[in-house]
Amino acid sequence: MSNDKEFRIKKDNCKETYLNGKTNTSELAVIYGVSEITVRKWIKSGNWDSLFKEERKLDAEIRTARKRALIQALREYAKNPADTALQSLVSLIKQNQKDDEPAKELNDYIVKFLDQTTDFMVEKGYETLLKQFQAIVLDLADYLRIRNG
């Protein structure tokens, strides 16, 4: 694989990661093995900041439109519950909304994993590592809150 192709792949992957909410340039530089200056140049030249803001705005509009559509479909369904097309529409909208929410099982699994990791570090005497881990988990939680609205 040529260096140009590798560089383009890194840039494309970095852009996707950035647009998904990981906007810390130093972390992106480490992840993709480039300098922080390179990441900043990519962000500026590609206008990633405005793309990031537009993505967040569109995500919010989609959530709002989905809620409005569900409310309207439920109102119509309440008027005519025998209408199978409305039943299907309500089911489709609800399923789509459910698909976008993280599964409770996944959340429970993540919490259990983090608890066990913390217990392991305490048992092994990795207090410094534990503090770093907790800071990273808090950053991750903030990142997920922003990314998932």
Image (spheres, rainbow, N blue to C red):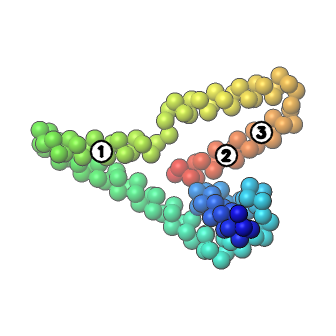
The quadrant holding residue 22 is: bottom right
Farthest residue to the front: give it. 1
User: Which callout, 2 or 1, points at the residue further toward the start of the chain?
Assistant: 1
Q: Which amino acid does label 1 sit on?
A: Leu
Q: Identify which residue is drawn at 82% across, 26% down.
A: 122
Q: Which amino acid does label 3 sit on?
A: Phe
Q: In which quarter of the image is the N terminus?
A: bottom right
Residue named by callout 2: 140
Q: Distance between the residues labelled 3 and 2?
A: 10 Å
Residue named by callout 3: 133
The image position of residue 16, as x and y in percent, is 60, 60
Residue named by callout 1: 92
Q: What residue type is labelled 2?
A: Leu
Q: From this viewpoint, is residue 90 visible?
A: yes
49 vs 31: above or below = below
Q: Identify which residue is drawn at 88% across, 27% down.
A: 125
The image position of residue 39, as x and y in percent, is 73, 67
Estimate how packed mark 2 is, as few (under 14), some (14 to 19) or many (20 or more) residues with alpha carbons within 10 Å.
few
45 vs 36: above or below = below
Q: From this viewpoint, is residue 26 visible?
A: no
